[in-house]
Amino acid sequence: MPKPIRIEATEMWDERNNEFIIVKPQTIIIEHSLVSISKWESKWHKMFLETKDKTPMEFLDYIRCMTINKDVNPFCYYALSQENLQDIVKYMEDPMTASSVTFFGNPGYHEPISSELIYYWMFTYGIPMEVEKWHINRLLMLIKIFSKKNSKPTKADKAAQAKQMAELNRKRCAALGTKG
């Protein structure tokens, strides 16, 4: 879901041209999506989700990549307040879903995730292209659900399931006063 960010009027000094720049109040509408990530990765040649310590310039450029409205003053990104930036980070961290998926497999395994890998997963699972504009956290949860539902149970899954069933059976026996 797109997020509006209101940027207040600001006056800045352009050292290159030795002049003041007036940034009029403006609202940008951002979308933290696969499309935005793809734009950023094509420019910076880095995996967005794997680059934890982005430079201020990389982060501002990502905000530019997330912007979906037209006719945006390019200087408005330099006029973002701390409150704007905190609001953007909060929006980006929002899971945007009520779902959760638990995996019993190898918890230490992590495959580096690029936009192309996410597109691969979408094509593999038959996820329609329209969802490339979903909030990325929601799209990744959908992919996790597809992965979980399409995977064969592992020994760890079966063992965890047996343990869970034994615990449930123990509780029922205790509640009913039976031995099983």
Image (tube, grey):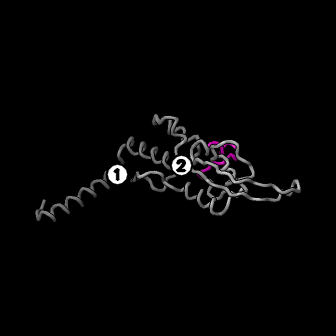
Q: Of residues 5 and 149, which is closer to you in this image?
A: 5
User: Residue 14 at x, y = what percent?
Assistant: 83, 56
Q: Residues within 10 Å of mark 1 (few under 14, many from 20)?
A: some
In the image, 37: left or right of 138?
right
In magenta stretch: residue 8 = no
The residue wearing badge 2 is: 111
Kindly report the distance in space between the C-alpha atoms of the residues bearing marks 1 and 2: 20 Å
Measured along the vertical axis of the image, is residue 178 above or below residue 158? below
At 64% across and 46% down in the image, what residue appears? Answer: 67
- What main secondary structure does the magenta stretch of the protein show? helix
Q: Point out residue 72 in the picture as x, y percentages from the top left corner.
A: 70, 46
- Badge 1 marks a residue whose secondary structure is helix
Instruction: Read off the residue under disc 1.
Output: 157
Task: Name, please, the residue furthest toward the right.
Answer: 18
Amino acid type assigned to the residue bearing label 2 in the image = Glu
Task: Give the quadrant of the C terminus.
Answer: bottom left
- x, y (%) of residue 58? 69, 53
Image coords of residue 123 (percent x, y): 50, 34
Q: Residues within 10 Å of mark 2 (few under 14, many from 20)?
A: few
Mark 1 and mark 2 in contact? Answer it, CB < 8 Å. Answer: no
Q: Is residue 55 left or right of residue 93?
A: right
The answer to which quarter of the image holds residue 18 is: bottom right
Q: Earlier in the sequence, mark 1 or mark 2?
A: 2
| Residue located at (67% from left, 61% from top) | 81
Residue sticking out furthest to the left: 178
- Secondary structure at badge 2 equals loop
Q: Which residues are magenta?
A: 37-49
Q: Residue at x 59, y 45 (%)?
A: 114
* Left or right: 102 in relation to 111: left
Q: Residue at x 87, y 56 (%)?
A: 19
